[in-house]
Amino acid sequence: MAATDIGPGLSLPRRERRYRFSMTPLADVMFQLLVFFMLSANITPYSLIDIRTGGLSGGAPAGAATAGAGAGRGTDIRSTAVWTLGPDGQITASGQRFGPDRLPVLADALVAQGTRDVLVVVGQGARVQQVVTVLQALNLRGITSVQIAGGGAAQ
């Protein structure tokens, strides 16, 4: 400690100033940043999709419900179109790969064939928005019986 003179022969001890780090302003700034990023985040909900659990006949567990508009009917695996959705949005149908821009054409072809059921095998790495896009394209064409299955690696 250093001494401070207050008169002839007298000196008082002087304390050194200590600067302390206060967490309160930091917490305030962090809270304001949190609120800012929460309000500015792109929060767009996915479209509301009617999803019911079920399975294909011949592979469904006993007592499982059947998905689709005609919930009372069974789904025949032989008349079901199988699509594989890859991580890049590519759809593999009947051994051919199609880009996401070809979805309406594929869905129209299913309607023309009279196919009412589709099994979408979602490959590893596929995004939720890609699945939603496929479901919306099928729904717009009147195909409401869609099964979704998880597949390992994309083909």
Image (cartoon, rainbow, N blue to C red):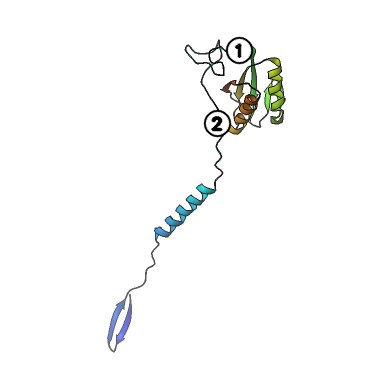
Q: In the orientation shown, which residue stands out farthest toward the left?
A: 10
Q: Is 29 left or right of 134, judged from the image as shown?
A: left
The tag earlier along the polypeptide, 2 or 1, is 2
125 relative to 78, above or below: below
**Quadrant housing residue 11:** bottom left
Instruction: Give the quadrant of the C terminus.
Output: top right
Q: Residues within 10 Å of mark 2 (few under 14, many from 20)?
A: few
Task: Name the disc covering residue 131, or none.
Answer: none
What is the count of numbered marks? 2
Q: Toward the viewer: 82 or 22?
A: 82
Horizontal and vertical percent position of residue 5:
32, 84
Horizontal and vertical percent position of residue 117:
62, 17
Instruction: Give the quadrant of the N terminus.
Output: bottom left
Amino acid type at mark 1: Ile
For disc 2, the marked residue is 48
Q: Residue at x 69, y 30 (%)?
A: 100
**Quadrant housing residue 96:** top right
45 relative to 20, above or below: above
Horizontal and vertical percent position of residue 145:
59, 19
Amino acid type at mark 2: Leu
Task: Name the disc covering residue 77, or none.
Answer: 1
Q: Residues within 10 Å of mark 1 (few under 14, many from 20)?
A: some
9 relative to 128, above or below: below
Q: Residue at x 60, y 33 (%)?
A: 129
Q: Secondary structure at mark 1?
A: helix
Q: Is 93 left or right of 51, judged from the image as shown?
A: right
